Image (cartoon, rainbow, N blue to C red):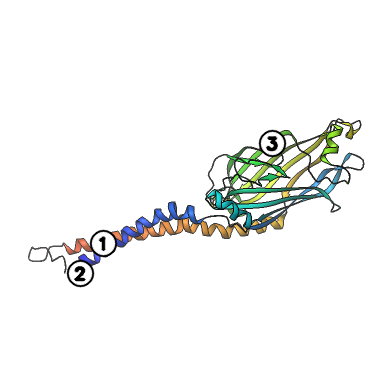
Amino acid sequence: MRRKASLVLLAFAVFFAALAPLLRWYAFPRLAKIPPSQYQEMVLEAKNATLLDYGTMRPKKVPKVTIVQTLKGNVEESEKIERTAGRDVVVWDGLSYVQGPDGKMVSEIPERYIFDAHTQDPVHADGEMVDGDPVRREGIEFKWPFLTEKRDYTYFDAQTRTSAPIHYRGTRNFRGLEVYYFEQTIPWTRVPMPKKMPVKGITPESVAKTGTTRWYTTKRMFWVDPTTGAPVNGQEIHREELRGGTLLGDQKKVTAFAGHVKMREDYVDYTVDLVSSQRQLVLLLTAYLPWAFLTLGTALLTLALFLEARGRRPDPGGKSSPSGA
């Protein structure tokens, strides 16, 4: 009986020991993914900012500029792309809506971001765009991969329509979470005028005829939960200028917008709570269950060896006890 019991225990020990790495390295990469229907909204503010008054073409100080960012999963488009891509795809239709202290629109820039649901790598397909301009993204945008590493990543900048490194700057504690801090600086770069302008009658084409150009620079900062890859906080020190041309009169350049953009406090609190709950699901597949199965397998192996050793112990007469006893 001891031998039969030890063999059963040995079989279970092998099963659980094999299940631990299988769950972590095979099941997790296939099970962890962004749902195609996900919707999220984020409100950011730049207090005591500088904003261009298009009536006078002079910059002025304003108490607050508000940026509302929305990302809406387009299930129909994701299913359409999946049929040719042969993998799970997420399509996010995004909108960055900027409004001044009077509630009027300053700019409105739509995006379509297409990416692999598991790895967050970009998927190139028809419809990938920023403000109506076709783009070909390289690197990530909005979200880091699951199990983010302590290294630099390539991050897509929607204003310049280009990708550049975003640098890992260390591990920090943010409201009880251990997070990775990343920074990216985009130097002064000429960028397109928004398709939708805040003043009637002014279009990118009419501005181009005056010879005036738009320039932009930013320092982008993210605090990222490494388990889920989700930013729990984001900030930008953002500046835009209009340069040259007859539109500015006697001015060579004028500040169109300047401010330290930060997530609104209630959205920071909401994001931290959401990520804290989601990270438990990821940890269940990557740490809790694999380690539990490995520990259980080791314990069962130890018990199997103990029973086998007892079954082979000599009896008082000097003979080994029957293995089936």
Amino acid marked by disc 2 = Met
Quadrant location, the C terminus: bottom left
Quadrant location, the N terminus: bottom left
| Secondary structure of the residue carrying numbered label 1 | helix
- Residue 17 position, x and y percent, is 35, 56
**The disc label shown at residue 246, or none:** none
In depth, the one of 171 and 205 nearer the eye is: 205
Residue at the image position 70 percent from the left and 48 percent from the top: 111
| Secondary structure of the residue carrying numbered label 3 | strand
Q: Is residue 100 visible?
A: no
- Residue 227 position, x and y percent, is 54, 52
**The disc label shown at residue 1, or none:** 2
Check the image and name the residue furthest to the left.
Answer: 317
Question: Seen in the image, is 147 located left or right of residue 156?
Answer: left
| Secondary structure of the residue carrying numbered label 2 | loop
Residue at the image position 10 percent from the left and 66 percent from the top: 316
Residue at the image position 39 percent from the left and 59 percent from the top: 293
Q: Which residue is disc 3 drawn over?
A: 186
Q: CA distance from mark 3 to mark 2?
A: 72 Å
Up the image or down, 122 lies above or below 264; here it is above
Tell which tag, 1 or 3, sits nearer the viewer: 3
Lower sequence index among marks 1 and 2: 2
Lower sequence index among marks 3 and 2: 2
Up the image or down, 107 lies above or below 303; here it is above
Q: Which residue is disc 1 drawn over?
A: 304
Amino acid marked by disc 1 = Ala
Q: CA distance from mark 1 to mark 2?
A: 12 Å
Up the image or down, 106 lies above or below 7; here it is above
Binning the other alpha carbons within 10 Å of mark 1 as few (below 14), some (14 to 19) or many (20 upward) gives many
